[in-house]
Image (cartoon, helix red, strand yellow):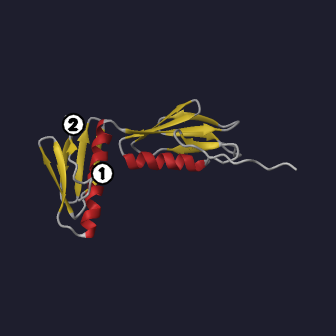
Amino acid sequence: MSRIGKLPIQIPSGVTITVADDAITVVGPKGQLVVPHLSDVTVAVEDNRAVVNRKDDERIAKAQHGLQRALLNNAVDGVTKGFEKKLEVNGVGFRVSGGGQEIEMSLGFSHPVKYKAPEGIQLTVNKMEITVNGIDKQLVGQVAAEIRGLKKPEPYKGKGIKYADEVILRKAGKAGK
């Protein structure tokens, strides 16, 4: 039995879950998310709890059990609290400006780098820190990874864009004679 899958999901007040054959719709104060309904599991909503059960003990059903519960729980968290990732920009001459849907960065290239966020993502710039906010956990992580990929941190001086909680392992430079 999946340890994650068998845990019930508490549904806070103001959140409604609608289960259909192919999709599960979660509506809350921050917005609406649609989660795919996997084929080998069932979702039952009863008295402020959502319970995920698998149809049989096949290998694919066991795999989908925990996945369906995790996707549904992330959707409930997203429409109530939202998700956020923080990025730090380190480097001499590096600049970040803008906010909202589009930011412009000077990352040591010959040209400024512009990044436009997809629908549903909000970008906030505070000095050399970029905050990515949204209700979809997967999309927030994807946008943060794309921004980090524009200038990954290098191991010698630590210049580049890194996650706020990321630790960059530093290397020693050239050894003198």
Quarter of the figure with residue 140: top left
Q: Front-most of 63 and 72?
A: 63
- Residue marked by disc 1: 70
* Disc sitting over residue 12 in the figure: 2
Quarter of the figure with residue 80: top left
Relative side of 64 to 95, left or right? left
Local secondary structure at mark 1:
helix
Mark 2 residue crowding within 10 angstroms, few (<14) / some (14–19) / many (20+): few
Disc nearer the start of the sequence (1/2)? 2
Mark 1 residue crowding within 10 angstroms, few (<14) / some (14–19) / many (20+): some
Residue 156 to residue 80: above or below: below
Q: Amino acid at mark 1?
A: Ala
Local secondary structure at mark 2:
loop
The spot of residue 167 in percent (x, y) is 57, 43
Relative side of 41 to 114, left or right? left
Q: Quadrant of the N terminus?
A: bottom left
Evaluate if marks 1 and 2 touch, with contact meaning CB atoms under 8 Å apart.
no
Quarter of the figure with residue 52: bottom left
Distance (Cα) linking label 1 and label 2: 16 Å
Relative side of 99 to 36, left or right? right
| Residue found at x 18% / y 50% | 51
Q: Amino acid at mark 2?
A: Pro
| Residue found at x 57% / y 50% | 149
| Residue found at x 24% / y 45% | 26
* Disc sitting over residue 96 in the figure: none
The spot of residue 150 in percent (x, y) is 59, 49
